[in-house]
Image (cartoon, rainbow, N blue to C red):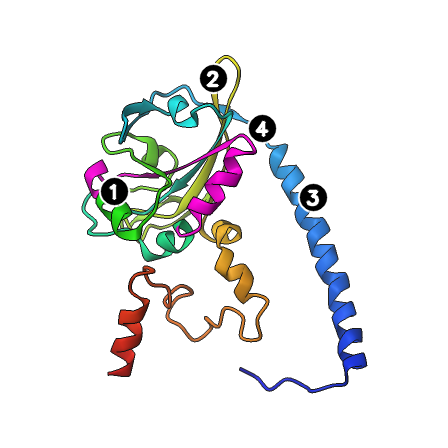
Amino acid sequence: MQQQKIVSPDDWRAARKELLAKEKALTRARDQLAAERRSLPWVEVDKSYMFDTPAGKKTLAELFGDKSQLFVYHFMLGPGWGEGCPSCSFLADQFDGAAIHLAARDVALVAVSRAPLTKIEAFKRRMGWRFEWVSSFGSDFNFDYQVSFRDEEVNAEGDYNYARQRIRSDEMPGASVFYKDADGAVFHTYSTYGRGLDILIGPYNFLDLTPKGRDEADLPWTMAWVRHHDRYDAAKSSKET
């Protein structure tokens, strides 16, 4: 961390007001971008998808419950994985609190993974989460929304985040949004991947306000410090021994 200049309260206030003008400009630009996002055209979902849930099989339309909007987090937990992705878990730690408020604004929040439901439920219990999390095992859902990749696609060039790139894993992060009209038709309205998910990471927003910020520049990758929330003490102990 670099040494910052120490100034008088008046000089600090002047510098802060200069930055505030830039922050306000960013807020206005973000609001405009959100409006443009809402203006994107939609695609009707005409393919049938089935999901395994604790209440039995459900269609995509049934995942909405009594809401007209559905936010799907594509949680990285593949059929052969022993546990959920730490970075996805970092986001998911915030879902229970968010889901209550989203429901009040006509939005259902559901996590979807390709792992069998029994594996999902076991990891969910370990993490102490309550949000709805379903399995798309045996369905094309994850493949169609470009967050899961077959064995032959891994380490080859494929489509992810709207570009051709080398696929590093059989599961990749993303979020997709859907709308259901009064007649029950479902439409895909938005999907985002990679750093497009940053906006969902509450702790990053806290860190961005602190002197050290995210402090990730010297790490092998940006989220190398992230652990499952039940493993931070173990990680700290291993460094101390």
Provide the residue designation for mark 3. Answer: 32
Q: Residue 185 shows which numbered tag?
A: 2
Q: Residue 161 shows which numbered tag?
A: none
Question: Residue 23 versus residue 62: which sits nearer the camera?
Answer: 62
What amino acid type should be assigned to the residue bearing mark 3? Gln
Q: Nearer the viewer, mark 4 or mark 3?
A: 3
Distance of mark 4 from mark 2, alpha carbons? 15 Å
What amino acid type should be assigned to the residue bearing mark 1? Ile
Provide the residue designation for mark 1. Answer: 120
Please give the range of residues in magenta: 93-121
Q: Residue at x 42, y 25 (%)?
A: 65
Whether residue 217 is situated above or below residue 195 in the rendered picture: below
Q: Quadrant of the C terminus?
A: bottom left
Q: Are marks 4 and 3 in contact (CB under 8 Å)?
A: no
What amino acid type should be assigned to the residue bearing mark 2? Ala
Per the image, label 1 sits on a secondary structure element best described as helix
Relative side of 108 to 123, left or right: right
Distance of mark 2 from mark 1, alpha carbons? 28 Å
Provide the residue designation for mark 4. Answer: 41
